[in-house]
Amino acid sequence: QVQLEESGGGLVRAGGSLRLSCAASGRIFSRNRMGWYRRAPGKQRELVAAITSGGSPNYADSVKGRFTISRDNAKNTVHLQMNSLKPEDTAVYYCNCVDIINREYWGQGTQVTVSS
């Protein structure tokens, strides 16, 4: 079983930055794939960024060059550094974990609001 807790959301002006963090429970965090998804009002949930157990990241085209995902296996945390934020980045951001037998876990989400 894995439990995820996000933090770091908030209100920021366009062009600003936020750093999201996700603290995960579980002894084998280092072997899990971690990711960040978001759901904007009226839209479907979409993948923002993910990072493999080996540390290889991938990003949605809309955030490439602006967002950076990273993980700290010693602290069981994953971060999403968001720079050059745009109003269209406004959404609830969810931490996601896929373990070694493909069980999926979700955090409760943290609101990110970018004002123009």
Image (spheres, rainbow, N blue to C red):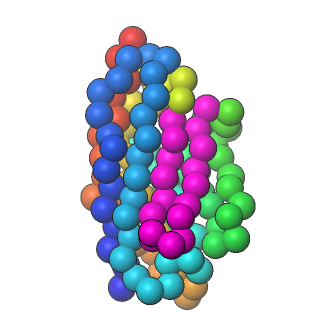
Q: Nearer the viewer, residue 103 or 20?
A: 20
- Residue drawn 35% across the image and 23% down it: 12
Q: Start and end of the magenta stretch?
A: 66-82
12 falls in the magenta region = no
| Main SS class of the magenta portion in the image | strand
- Residue drawn 51% across the image and 36% down it: 82
Residue 68 lies, in percent from the top left, at 60, 44
- Total number of numbered discs in the rendering: 0
Q: Is residue 86 visible to the viewer in this orientation of the structure?
A: no
Give the image quarter of residue 3. bottom left
Residue 57 lies, in percent from the top left, at 68, 55
Residue 96 lies, in percent from the top left, at 45, 63
Q: Quadrant of the N terminus?
A: bottom left
Q: Is residue 67 visible to the viewer in this orientation of the structure?
A: yes
Tell me if 83 is positioned left or right of 91 in this view: right
Q: Nearer the viewer, residue 81 or 62?
A: 81
- Residue drawn 68% across the image and 52% down it: 58
Give the image quarter of residue 62. top right
Tell me if 114 is positioned left or right of 100 in this view: left
71 falls in the magenta region = yes
The single residue placed furthest to the top in the displayed view is 116
Give the image quarter of residue 65. top right
Q: Is residue 30 above or below residue 107?
A: below
Tell me if 62 is positioned left or right of 96 in this view: right
Q: Nearer the viewer, residue 79 or 75?
A: 75
Q: Nearer the viewer, residue 16 or 101?
A: 16
- Residue drawn 31% across the image and 62% down it: 5
The single residue placed furthest to the front in the displayed view is 74
Q: Is residue 33 above or below residue 68?
A: below
Q: Quadrant of the C terminus?
A: top left
Q: Is residue 42 above or below residue 72?
A: above
